[in-house]
Amino acid sequence: MSSSKKSSMFSIIGASSVGTMIEWYDFYIFGSLATIISTKFFPAGNETLSYLSTLATFAAGFIVRPFGALFFGRLGDLIGRKYTFMVTLLLMGGATFFIGMIPAYETIGMFAPIGVLLLRLLQGLALGGEYGGAATYVAEHSPDNERGFMTSWIQITATAGLIISLIVIAITKLSMTKESFEAFGWRIPFLASILMVGVSYLIRRNMHESPLFAKVKSEGKTSTNPLKESFGNRLNFKFVLLALLGVTMGQGVVWYTGQFYAMSFIEKVMSVPKEQVDSILIWGLLLGTPFFVLFGWLSDKIGRKWIMMAGMLIAVLSYRSIYNHMYETVNIKNKTELAEKGTSLAEIKENAKNANGGMDSVFTVTKEFTDGTTYKEVKTLTLNNGVADTKDGKPIVDTKKTVTINNADKWTLIFMVFIQMLFVTMVYGPVAAFLVEMFPVKIRYTSMSLPYHIGNGIFGGLLPAIATFLVTSAKSANDKAKELGEAIPFDKPHLEGLWYPIVIAGICFIIGTIYLDGKDNKVNE
């Protein structure tokens, strides 16, 4: 490729990537703020239930992504790639902005979670149309021998959007007090999206249509019914199923385990403060991001199939060891306490959320350890007229634990996230080129978008909620067994959530290994 063509190619990649990255930012800012959103848009009283409700709302955006893929994929194959992902950009930006404008639950009641859910669904529809358009657009500009490398820059955008969401949140927190952030500052990352979308729109409106699609359109060879040709044609539908079952469902769970579930696990299971969790994720993702391009480039040299299959297999074999090591690194049972530094405090506080003037009995225990780790446990018992709230005849005690880790443990966790990022980049770096090469020009947008968004939107997007539910259920089963004096059923309940990605990625590896031919094809058909 000549230097002028290469310069033009990178301009195309840049214009496509900026918009796609902003859409991922918009989509993931919700997940990055899941903890505080659970307190703003959902009923108070059960922290775990509110958090699971937030994860379910987060997952709803993923569930509708396949519908967005069908709607916008069809549009992209009928009228063009450029116009379609201009529309998805504006739809995503508008939905994100209005999430930041919705009043809290205590102001408008059930209209808050309903409004957030509806806007989250719009986000999912928009993202369902964006990725396929961007990947197809770049691939159709790329030379055959560099397609993996060129499209790998699009693959960076999902992780880059997550990183930027975490950085914007961190900067917003640093610019104000904790009280201000919890009161209104958390809305700023949502509202800021409108500025990013505006810039991206100005960049994208000057882009030209994909040359391959323009050629097909000028020759009158576009599909008259992309949905029917994609899924009604038996041969093409076979490739759609193979793309889903042999590639994207495994790729989806590996991506979300290595990034979103890692974040959720460190914060909710290991009880590390949100600020430290965000720092760990940012560093781990930054260190791993260049490998998207490396594995995309490598796929041009040695083929795409075995890089992706190897990433899935290594992930399946490694996840339980990695997450157990993460857990034990922070586990205070493995640390030596400085007994003289421990404190305990019992106090009665007014319960501001109780209209009847109820009180909270609060018991706080703080422990310090020789390696610099600090543990804090706060148990709250709500009293109404001096009587504790009960459930099943037992007082309801709300327990919050926080483990503030030392620098050495922080870098251990960063390394563990980085290792998972290597798995992510192996399966995700080459996947855009692989999917594009499976389908002909006239139905490519539709055909590749659906399996991608089922694999990532449903199999991957549901992962945080399913894995968190499995961990919570395992812990509850152990607690019940202890009450009954029985043997606990789960030796390591904190690892139970990993069975979901292990099983899905394992099945995908088997199907992909057996049925994918591993040949890289041209895209000008």
Image: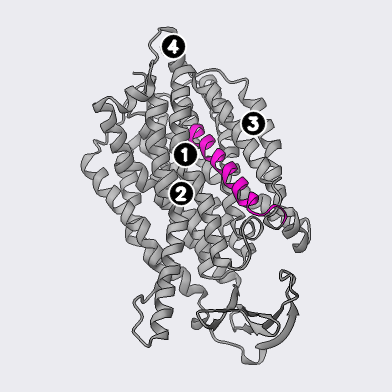
Left or right of 218? Residue 115 is right
**Residue 358 position within the rendered picture, expressed as x and y whole percent measured from the top left:** 72, 77
Taking the spot 64% from the left edge, 41% from the top edge, the residue there is 96
Tell me, yes or no, whether the highlighted magenta stretch contains residue 511.
no
| Residue where numbered disc 1 is placed | 65
The tag earlier along the polypeptide, 4 or 3, is 3
Alpha carbon of mark 2 to alpha carbon of mark 3: how far? 25 Å
Q: How is the image coloured?
A: one colour
Q: Residues within 10 Å of mark 4 (few under 14, many from 20)?
A: some
Q: Count the marks: how many?
A: 4
Task: Give the percent coordinates (x, y) of residue 363.
Answer: 66, 84
Measured Cα–Cα span from mark 4 to mark 3: 26 Å
Q: Earlier in the sequence, mark 2 or mark 1?
A: 1
Q: Mark on residue 461?
A: 2
In the figure, is residue 203 to the left or right of 9?
Answer: right
Instruction: Give the magenta part as a residue range.
Output: 107-131
Question: Could you tell me which secondary element the residue under label 1 belongs to?
Answer: helix
Location of mark 3 (residue)? 200
Query: Compared to 251, does 222 lie above or below?
Result: above
Give the crowd class for mark 2: few <14, some 14-19, many >=20 residues within 10 Å. many
Q: Is residue 456 visible?
A: yes
Of badges 1 and 3, nearer the viewer stands 1
Q: Are marks 1 and 3 in contact (CB under 8 Å)?
A: no
